[in-house]
Image: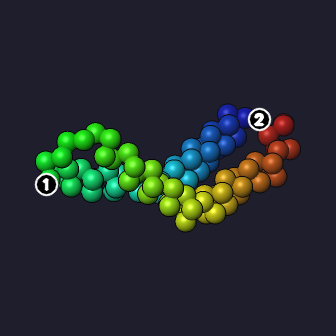
Amino acid sequence: MTIDDVTAVAETAIFTIIKCAAPLLLVSLCVGLIVSIFQTVTSIQEQTLTFVPKVLAIFIALILMGHWIMNNMVEYMTDLWTNFTVYLR
């Protein structure tokens, strides 16, 4: 296995991680921004207020996007196992 193979596997792994995590992070960012604006407008400075909406939003996003995320991870692992003999050289 050459340095180019290792770099290609690492690049694909990092891209897959970013691609799978991005939807959940964006949902968390949007909900946090909305709750922050709500806290600013109403002058409520409760730090635990952001926790429950974020958890619920991420849970709903996981329900909606879980199949897509799992397909991306399975596709990556299938590609790794398919090319396993190439990596043994």
Instruction: Judge from the rendering whether residue 76 lies leftward or rightward of residue 23; answer left or right.
Output: right
Residue 22 visible in image: no
Q: CA distance from mark 1 to mark 2?
A: 58 Å
Residue 61 or 43: which is nearer the viewer? 43
For the residues carrying marks 1 and 2, which lies nearer the camera in this image? 1
Q: Position of residue 37 (x, y in %)?
A: 20, 54
Q: Position of residue 76 (x, y in %)?
A: 69, 52
Q: Position of residue 54 (x, y in %)?
A: 40, 51
Q: Position of residue 31 (x, y in %)?
A: 34, 55
- 13 relative to 70, above or below: above
Determine the residue positioned at 33% across, 56% down.
Answer: 30
- Of labels 1 and 2, earlier in sequence is 2
- 36 relative to 67, above or below: above
Kind of residue at badge 2:
Met
Q: Quadrant of residue 85?
A: top right
Instruction: Say which element carries label 2.
Output: loop
Q: Quadrant of residue 74?
A: bottom right
Q: How many marks?
A: 2
Residue picked out by circle 2: 1
Instruction: Judge from the rendering whether residue 34 lies leftward or rightward of residue 68; answer left or right.
Output: left
Determine the residue positioned at 55% across, 53% down.
Answer: 20
Residue picked out by circle 1: 41
The answer to the question of whether label 1 and label 2 lie on touching residues, with beta carbons closer than 8 A, is no
Quarter holding the N terminus?
Answer: top right
Instruction: Say which element carries label 1.
Output: helix
Q: Residues within 10 Å of mark 2 (few under 14, many from 20)?
A: few
Residue 30 visible in image: yes
Residue 74 or 45: which is nearer the viewer? 45
